[in-house]
């Protein structure tokens, strides 16, 4: 029989990550040593106390029912975490919703609020799931350029009025992926005012809230009036190395929460209860783990940044997140340079233009290997033919 995809599937092309993975496997089969710094998947385990809780509960035969929108104790743990870490009060019954990883919520939320033809303001460069979310809703993206001269903060005043009249949502992400920038209180306060003026829902992706090195990131909801215009998504994937557990949450405006809840109640029946209870342990005892995690990533950041600078690649040291956003040498496109780095040094990075037009001229490098492997990556680049290009 002949099987054809729907027209909607034309909006979901194969991602560059899959293409890089296929090429990486080809080189490995040829016997080449490969160090993968492309995908932001943590290589470290969750805390011992999280794994112990999970191991204990999977043996409990009463834990295998549907969990729907999250058990009350998970909501309570989120409430306590936000109060303790960000001095933000949220109503655990009306302003908290569990999701199956923050990407699940991010991708589905526009379906609840945007109609076909509506605009959604999205960072450029930005996380690839945002584009998928917009396509799923049938909406239209309006890219907000993140430029170095603006500290990688979007200039809201450059958005045309005719676009604003049709805009339903604004997506923000600080600390960001792929750009590890931090927002300021002044910027977020301007966002709240802007959203009120133009009747725009704000969706802040806060997945890297615990991965910072000096200055603690600001929760959007800590800004006066923020809960009246938007919500904040957070995840246990990066902060607690629970990426495969697929659990996250959204907090903030109760109408937005209710809309996503209504949609999600038609799509799934929740997260495995032992995973929720393990997540409760992570959120409740976060300080005992996240300080150590930050120190690990800081050491990795310093080793890689200093190593690359020593061979002539002057990359910026990020203030937060698990990525370097590195300018590439002149004379290359981002895609060409990524493949050249893979061919000549066996290092996998992600070309910046995979995240939007403004990402051209950069690559994203993930700090997802040990310090020894990061040093090995530096040596491999130094030994390659590419090194002479980097020092020009």
Image (cartoon, grey):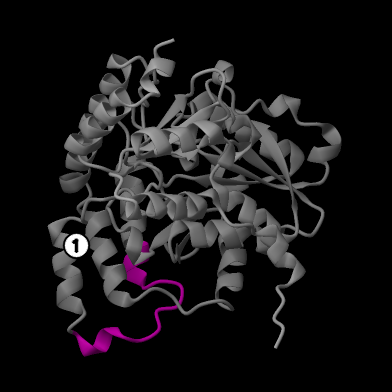
Residue 193 place in picture, x, y as percent: 65, 33
Indicate the quadrant where residue 87 lies.
top left
Dot 1 corresponds to which residue?
50
On screen, residue 281 versus residue 7, left or right, reads: left
Residue 64: within the magenta?
Answer: yes
Residue at image x 46%, y 57%? Answer: 102
Near-viewer residue (120 or 305): 305
Query: The N terminus appears in which quarter of the rendering?
Result: bottom right
Query: In the rendered image, is residue 273 in sight?
Result: yes
- Residue sitting at x 69%, y 66%: 9
Q: Residue at x 31, y 48 (%)?
A: 239
Q: Is residue 275 magenta?
A: no
For the residue pair 58 and 82, the one nearer the viewer reads as: 58
Magenta extent: 60-75
**Rendered view: 346 above or below 360:** below
Task: Please indicate whether residue 20 sits to the left or right of residue 387 in the image.
Answer: right
Q: Quadrant of residue 310?
A: top left
- Please report the residue visible at 52 percent of the width from the left and 60 percent of the height from the top: 105
Relative height, residue 235 to residue 345 (above, below): below
């Amino acid at each position: 029989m002949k099987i054809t995809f729907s027209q909607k599937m034309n909006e979901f092309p194969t991602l560059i990550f899959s293409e890089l993975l296929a090429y990486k496997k080809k080189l490995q089969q040829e016997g080449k040593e490969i160090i993968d710094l492309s995908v932001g998947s943590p290589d470290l385990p969750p805390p011992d106390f999280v794994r112990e809780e999970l191991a204990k509960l999977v043996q409990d035969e009463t834990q295998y029912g549907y969990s729907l929108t999250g058990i009350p104790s998970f909501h309570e743990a989120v409430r306590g975490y936000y109060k303790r870490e960000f001095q933000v009060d949220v109503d655990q019954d009306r302003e908290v919703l569990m999701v199956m990883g923050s990407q699940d919520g991010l991708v589905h939320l526009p379906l609840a609020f945007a109609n076909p033809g509506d605009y959604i303001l999205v960072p450029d460069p930005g996380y690839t799931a945002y584009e998928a979310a917009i396509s799923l809703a049938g909406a239209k993206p309006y890219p907000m350029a993140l430029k170095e001269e603006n500290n990688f903060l979007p200039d809201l005043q450059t958005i045309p009025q005719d676009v604003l009249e049709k805009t339903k949502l604004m997506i923000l992400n600080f600390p960001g992926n792929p750009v590890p920038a931090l927002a300021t209180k002044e910027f977020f306060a301007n966002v709240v005012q802007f959203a009120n003026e133009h009747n725009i829902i704000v969706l802040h992706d806060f997945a890297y809230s615990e991965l910072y090195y000096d200055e603690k990131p600001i929760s959007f909801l800590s800004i006066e009036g923020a809960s009246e215009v938007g919500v904040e998504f957070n995840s246990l994937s990066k902060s607690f190395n629970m990426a495969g557990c697929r659990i996250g949450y959204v907090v903030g405006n109760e109408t937005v929460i209710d809309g996503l809840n209504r949609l999600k109640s038609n799509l799934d029946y929740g997260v495995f209860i032992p995973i929720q209870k393990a997540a409760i342990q992570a959120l409740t005892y976060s300080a005992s783990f996240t300080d150590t995690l930050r120190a690990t990533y800081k050491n990795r950041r310093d080793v890689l940044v200093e190593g690359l600078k020593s061979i002539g690649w002057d990359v910026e040291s990020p203030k937060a997140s698990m990525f370097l956003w590195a300018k590439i040498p002149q004379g290359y496109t981002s895609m060409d340079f990524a493949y050249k780095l893979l061919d000549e040094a066996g290092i996998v990075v992600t070309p910046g233009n995979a995240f939007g037009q403004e990402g051209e001229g950069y690559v994203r490098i993930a700090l997802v290997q040990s310090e020894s492997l990061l040093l090995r990556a530096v040596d491999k680049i130094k030994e390659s033919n590419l090194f002479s290009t980097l020092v020009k």
